[in-house]
Amino acid sequence: MLGVSLGSRLLRGVGGRHGQFGARGVSEGGAAMAAGESMAQRMVWVDLEMTGLDIEKDQIIEMACLITDSDLNILAEGPNLIIKQPDELLDSMSDWCKEHHGKSGLTKAVKESTITLQQAE
Protein backbone atom coordinates (compact mmCIF):
# COMPACT_ATOMS: atom_id res chain seq x y z
CA MET A 1 0.00 0.00 0.00
CA LEU A 2 1.70 3.15 -1.25
CA GLY A 3 0.41 5.65 1.31
CA VAL A 4 1.19 3.60 4.38
CA SER A 5 4.71 2.58 3.43
CA LEU A 6 5.69 6.05 2.18
CA GLY A 7 4.12 7.68 5.21
CA SER A 8 6.01 5.52 7.65
CA ARG A 9 9.28 6.21 5.82
CA LEU A 10 8.51 9.92 5.78
CA LEU A 11 7.95 10.01 9.52
CA ARG A 12 11.27 8.25 10.06
CA GLY A 13 12.95 10.84 7.84
CA VAL A 14 14.34 8.40 5.30
CA GLY A 15 15.35 9.99 2.02
CA GLY A 16 16.18 8.59 -1.39
CA ARG A 17 19.53 8.06 -3.01
CA HIS A 18 18.56 10.09 -6.07
CA GLY A 19 18.06 13.28 -4.09
CA GLN A 20 14.51 13.58 -5.39
CA PHE A 21 12.77 13.16 -2.09
CA GLY A 22 13.25 13.37 1.63
CA ALA A 23 11.48 14.46 4.77
CA ARG A 24 12.32 17.46 6.83
CA GLY A 25 11.17 18.78 10.13
CA VAL A 26 9.18 15.93 11.59
CA SER A 27 9.92 13.79 14.63
CA GLU A 28 7.79 12.68 17.54
CA GLY A 29 8.64 15.06 20.37
CA GLY A 30 11.09 16.94 18.12
CA ALA A 31 11.40 20.62 17.31
CA ALA A 32 8.57 20.56 14.79
CA MET A 33 6.03 19.37 17.36
CA ALA A 34 4.44 21.99 19.56
CA ALA A 35 4.00 21.25 23.24
CA GLY A 36 1.06 18.89 23.68
CA GLU A 37 0.66 18.25 19.95
CA SER A 38 0.17 14.63 18.97
CA MET A 39 0.49 12.78 15.70
CA ALA A 40 -3.34 12.60 15.67
CA GLN A 41 -3.44 16.38 15.10
CA ARG A 42 -1.48 16.09 11.87
CA MET A 43 -2.73 15.62 8.35
CA VAL A 44 -0.90 13.85 5.55
CA TRP A 45 -1.61 15.27 2.10
CA VAL A 46 -0.80 13.11 -0.91
CA ASP A 47 -1.08 14.50 -4.44
CA LEU A 48 -0.92 12.03 -7.32
CA GLU A 49 -0.57 12.68 -11.01
CA MET A 50 -1.68 9.72 -13.08
CA THR A 51 -1.90 8.63 -16.69
CA GLY A 52 -5.69 9.00 -16.45
CA LEU A 53 -8.65 8.66 -14.10
CA ASP A 54 -9.34 4.91 -14.41
CA ILE A 55 -7.84 3.33 -11.29
CA GLU A 56 -8.10 -0.11 -12.90
CA LYS A 57 -5.74 0.67 -15.79
CA ASP A 58 -4.04 4.04 -15.27
CA GLN A 59 -0.81 4.39 -13.32
CA ILE A 60 0.86 6.87 -10.98
CA ILE A 61 3.49 9.02 -12.67
CA GLU A 62 4.14 11.54 -9.89
CA MET A 63 3.44 11.77 -6.18
CA ALA A 64 4.07 14.47 -3.63
CA CYS A 65 3.45 14.47 0.09
CA LEU A 66 3.10 17.10 2.82
CA ILE A 67 2.39 16.84 6.53
CA THR A 68 0.58 19.74 8.18
CA ASP A 69 -0.65 20.51 11.64
CA SER A 70 -4.29 21.28 12.38
CA ASP A 71 -3.69 24.93 11.38
CA LEU A 72 -2.32 23.79 7.98
CA ASN A 73 1.25 24.84 8.76
CA ILE A 74 3.62 22.64 6.76
CA LEU A 75 5.66 20.45 9.09
CA ALA A 76 7.32 18.16 6.54
CA GLU A 77 7.61 17.87 2.78
CA GLY A 78 8.32 14.80 0.72
CA PRO A 79 8.83 12.42 -0.64
CA ASN A 80 8.25 13.97 -4.04
CA LEU A 81 8.73 11.34 -6.72
CA ILE A 82 8.46 11.09 -10.49
CA ILE A 83 7.88 7.47 -11.41
CA LYS A 84 9.18 5.83 -14.58
CA GLN A 85 6.48 4.34 -16.79
CA PRO A 86 6.79 2.62 -20.18
CA ASP A 87 6.41 4.72 -23.33
CA GLU A 88 3.45 2.55 -24.40
CA LEU A 89 1.52 3.63 -21.30
CA LEU A 90 2.35 7.30 -21.86
CA ASP A 91 1.36 6.99 -25.52
CA SER A 92 -2.04 5.58 -24.49
CA MET A 93 -2.93 8.56 -22.26
CA SER A 94 -5.97 10.65 -23.17
CA ASP A 95 -5.47 13.80 -25.21
CA TRP A 96 -6.06 15.88 -22.06
CA CYS A 97 -3.29 14.09 -20.14
CA LYS A 98 -0.90 14.23 -23.10
CA GLU A 99 -1.46 17.97 -23.45
CA HIS A 100 -1.25 18.92 -19.77
CA HIS A 101 1.51 16.53 -18.70
CA GLY A 102 3.39 17.46 -21.87
CA LYS A 103 3.11 21.23 -21.28
CA SER A 104 4.19 20.92 -17.65
CA GLY A 105 7.22 18.81 -18.55
CA LEU A 106 5.95 15.85 -16.55
CA THR A 107 5.85 13.43 -19.50
CA LYS A 108 9.51 14.16 -20.28
CA ALA A 109 10.43 13.82 -16.60
CA VAL A 110 8.64 10.44 -16.40
CA LYS A 111 10.61 9.19 -19.40
CA GLU A 112 13.88 10.33 -17.79
CA SER A 113 13.09 9.04 -14.29
CA THR A 114 14.90 6.01 -12.90
CA ILE A 115 12.46 5.44 -10.01
CA THR A 116 10.15 2.45 -10.43
CA LEU A 117 6.77 2.13 -8.73
CA GLN A 118 8.24 -0.66 -6.60
CA GLN A 119 11.04 1.64 -5.41
CA ALA A 120 8.54 4.40 -4.67
CA GLU A 121 6.43 2.04 -2.55
Image (cartoon, rainbow, N blue to C red):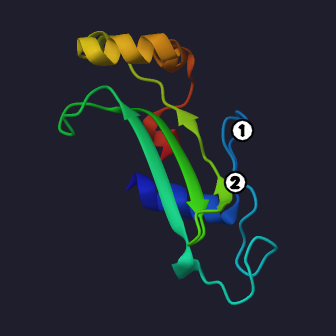
Point out the tag, 2 or 1, that comes first from the N-terminus. Answer: 1
Q: Is residue 63 left or right of residue 55?
A: right
Label 1: state its secondary structure: loop
Q: Position of residue 59 (x, y in %)?
A: 32, 32
Q: Position of residue 34 (x, y in %)?
A: 74, 80
Q: Residue furthest front?
A: 71
| Image position of 121 with respect to 67: above or below | above
| Residue drawn at (51%, 67%) of the image | 43
| Residue drawn at (17%, 38%) of the image | 56
Badge nearest the viewer, 2 or 1: 2
Q: Rounded to the nearest whole Å, what is the CA distance between mark 2 and mark 1?
A: 13 Å
Q: Position of residue 62 (x, y in %)?
A: 47, 33
The residue singled out by tag 2 in the image is: 23
Residue 90 shows in the view: no
Task: Identify the amino acid type marked 1.
Answer: Arg
The residue singled out by tag 1 in the image is: 17
| Image position of 119 with respect to 116: above or below | below
| Residue drawn at (31%, 25%) of the image | 51
Badge 2 density bin: few <14, some 14–19, many ≥20, Cα 10 Å: many
Residue 92 bears which disc, if any? none
Q: Is residue 66 left or right of residue 45?
A: right
Q: Nearer the viewer, residue 28 or 88?
A: 28
